[in-house]
Amino acid sequence: MGNCIICGTPVDGEICESHEEDAVFEFRGTSASQLTPGRYYRGTVDGYADFGVFVDIGDHVTGLLHRSELDQRLESLDWEPGDDVFVQVLDVRDNGNVDLGWSIRQREREFRGKLIQTGDDEFRPEEFEDDADESDTETTTEPTTSEESAADSDGLTDDRAATAGELQAAADETQPESETDAVDEQSPAADPAGSVASSGSVATESAAASTPATDAEPDAESEPTLKRTTIGSIENQVGNVVHLEGEITGVRQTSGPTVFELRDETATVECAAFEEAGVRAYPDVELDDVVALEGEVEHHHGDLQVETESLDILEGDERDTVVDRLESALEREARPADVELLADHDAVAAVKANIADAATAIRRAVMEARPIVVRHGATADGYVAGAAIERAVLPLIREKHTREDAEYHYFERRPLDGRVYDMDAATNDVTAMLEARERHGEQVPLVVLVDAGSTVESTDGYELLSLYDAEALVIDDSRADDAVTDAVGVDVAPSLAGVDVGAVTSTALATNVAAHVNDDVRDDLEHLPAVSYWEDTPEAYLELATEAGYDETGVSERREAIELEAYYQSYKDKRELVIDLLFGDGDDSERPRDGDLAAHVSEQFRDKLETELETARENLTVEGVNGVTVSVLDTDAFTHRYNFPTTILLLDALHRSERDRTDSPYVTLGVGDDELHVRATATVDVRDLGDSIAEAVPNGGVSVVGGQDGHVEFLPGERDAVREAALEALGETLA
């Protein structure tokens, strides 16, 4: 029986129940189950994710402070990895995950008291230190000079030293008959000279240090050799020491251990190695090294993790053997056995081999633990195509990685402003890539361009990626340029195969790639191609959607809803919202049914679009040029440029609604202060149009963005001259 450190009330412990939230606790336990929900704890920032901050509570437990628990935006939080912070434990889940809450008190003096919490008790700081000192005195003999040096070099804190002493005392009481046996049992990482490899085990190092060097020398012939275990089978090895061989695909330093990500031919696992808190273990081991690792398999916050006991870089024949094994397994597993398209479609069939190559590249990236970054246009076609790739890749990442949050580290969709992968977008990706490599030890990503990036204007961006050995592939329905073939690893672009791209969408291409990335999600994707067509949907795709349970109304509602949501916060992936709209995964009663959600959002889409169309129709200027009817819209004067719909979407809808009013060639021309967009009933090469305008207006700063299907940019001061030159060029081309 003691007294509460705050109010003095007699309690069984050191603090009464009513004042638990007034004290801050320093956790010295070893398991999340030993934490007490409701209490405030000192922690250390481990790292950031899109959904919150990971905080180490002591040396053995990490919790998640979700962004929804913060009292400010996650982006504005000025915490750095290694910073001391104060958080509240909200819940400890059955799987070991710890939910943390925000603490407005971020200094120790703002709490009314402090306690040390061990696995099953709490102590006042001064009492805990006294107990630790007494334990050292009672359980250890007078250390030799060499033992003192070893303890100092290990940088043990008082409580770690006490633990080491207790373990040594227990070892002395159960001393095996031979000293050699003791070394074999307690220190398998000891080398023939009697030194100990950095293993992350304080007990092992302490026991080895306490054993005389002459007795610690093992018999190499009698030393047991562990049989290699594949990472894919370690789930049944929890509590056992295993021998793994593979490639290092990630290295990150936490405030406690160094975490290595190891990949073999079956899966990927995180391996924790401890040298000293915040100190890099095995500093010679880097990304792409091929290693042999031994350690104990355990559950860490619900994920499988290996506690590293030894880690050796393989060279020569040993390295070649592992590399060959990895490469053979990759090639065998990554490439689809055959290509079976979702439906008969000539434009897609023309790039059947390219689809297989793209699926192989994506699957390899998952197996090699390389992040995948999908870049797509902020349109319905772009979002649906990107979502198809996402749908296929995420389950594979979950399957191949043991980390619960792996999908947030190894897959990302980043919408593009436009359909060109320019230097701005590439610089953004390279910056994020370098930051991830520096902070988390991640490899360079595979960048997948969907519904964008197939024209020569994107090659500068690809060249920047290539300087860092980052691979790129393109899936696009635009009329592509031959130069892109040399700039990227794989292209899925029917125009390069001589196919009319008017009959295909990027989604039709991307869903076929996705179906071969992961055949298990093929049924989920069948309605997506139909969603991407605004008109002239191939009958085969309508039939697929119908068989999947989506009638024409359901298909159009999803297309319109995605187009509207793509406009808002166009730089964000909106993963959960897109999933709800396209797949209706939420059985949760708190989430809307996909049909109800799509119908509601599409109604807003139609209202907003029709309002803008009415205004645009009233302000069209119709001209006849060489028998060609041209409707010109001043897009700066007669559109709400910063409201929905976008200029591109408005001109597309306007052209579809007006083109049947005449039997002659019909053109819708949108002219703004510095941009010109063209829509026509006949094919127009915008690059040729730009050349004609530039010749007529040499001082207009005329350039084309987006290739043959792009738009013309010019200097605002030459707007009228550019307009007249465009009309003349269109009349000559289409007459």
Image (cartoon, grey):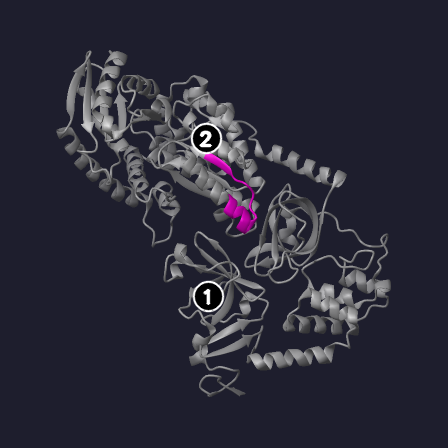
Comparing labels 2 and 1, the label whose residue is closer to the camera: 2
Q: Nearer the viewer, residue 493 or 691?
A: 691
The residue shown at (15%, 26%) is: 620
**Placement of 175 over or under 632, stated as above or below:** below
- Residue 340 visible in image: no
Q: Amino acid at mark 2?
A: Asp
Question: Residue lying farthest left?
Answer: 618
Which quarter of the image is occupied by the N terminus?
Answer: bottom right
- Residue 545 visible in image: yes
Q: Which residues are magenta?
A: 434-448
- Mark 2 or 1, nearer chain start: 1
Task: Tell me, yes or no, whether the highlighted magenta stretch contains residue 403.
Answer: no
Numbered marks: total: 2
Label 1 packing within 10 angstroms: few (<14), some (14-19), many (20+): some
Side of 549 relative to 369 (left or right): left
Q: Amino acid at mark 1?
A: Asp
Label 2 packing within 10 angstroms: few (<14), some (14-19), many (20+): some
Tell me the residue that label 1 is attached to.
91
**Placement of 589 over or under 13, stated as above or below:** above
Side of 641 relative to 291 (left or right): left
Task: Tell me, yes or no, whether the highlighted magenta stretch contains residue 445.
Answer: yes
Q: Residue 69, how many percent across, how many down?
A: 39, 61
Q: Nearer the viewer, residue 486 or 683?
A: 486
Circle 1 — which element?
strand
The circle on residue 234 is none
Q: Residue 232, how many percent across, how many down?
A: 62, 46
Circle 2 — which element?
helix
Q: Residue 486, how many percent across, how many down?
A: 51, 24
Tell me the residue that label 2 is attached to.
460
User: Answer yes or no: do the residues labelled 2 and 1 have beta carbons within 8 Å?
Assistant: no
